[in-house]
Amino acid sequence: MRTARRGLPFALTWWSFVLPLGTLVTGTSALTARVPSPMFASVAVVLYGVLVLGWVTVAVRTLFQR
């Protein structure tokens, strides 16, 4: 909690949050392929957007680490 209040400084361990999210997106997309439901499709698209945002954030922070 103390670290989170200080702004949660970047560390390479942030990748450990992105990789499971990719697995969740893959599973949701596979579920959408098997069960053609607009709800699953919407959730898959939203999760994919979150994954891309997270991946870009962590990649940029990795490249321009202070």
Image (tube, helix red, strand yellow):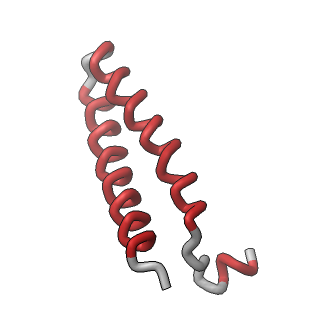
Q: Answer with left or right where residue 40 lies relative to residue 38.
A: right
- Which of 61 and 45 lies nearest the eye of the viewer? 61
Q: Quadrant of residue 63?
A: bottom left
Q: As drawn, which residue projects farthest toward the right?
A: 2
Residue 40 x, y percent position in the rendering: 33, 29
- As drawn, 61 above or below 42: below
Quadrant for residue 42, please give it: top left
- Is 28 placed above or below 36 here? below
Judge left or right: residue 41 versus residue 3: left
Location of residue 30 (image quadrant): top left
Residue at 60%, 61% (x, y): give it.
Answer: 13
Q: Residue at x 30, y 51 (%)?
A: 49
> Residue at position x 36%, y 53% from top?
50
| Residue drawn at (37%, 51%) of the image | 51
Q: Quadrant of the N terminus?
A: bottom right
Count of picture labels: 0
Residue 19 x/y as whole percent = 49, 46
Q: Nearer the viewer, residue 44 or 65?
A: 65
- 1 to 54, vertically: above or below: below
> Residue placed farthest to the top in the image?
34
Q: Position of residue 43 (x, y in %)?
A: 34, 38
| 47 vs 11: above or below | above
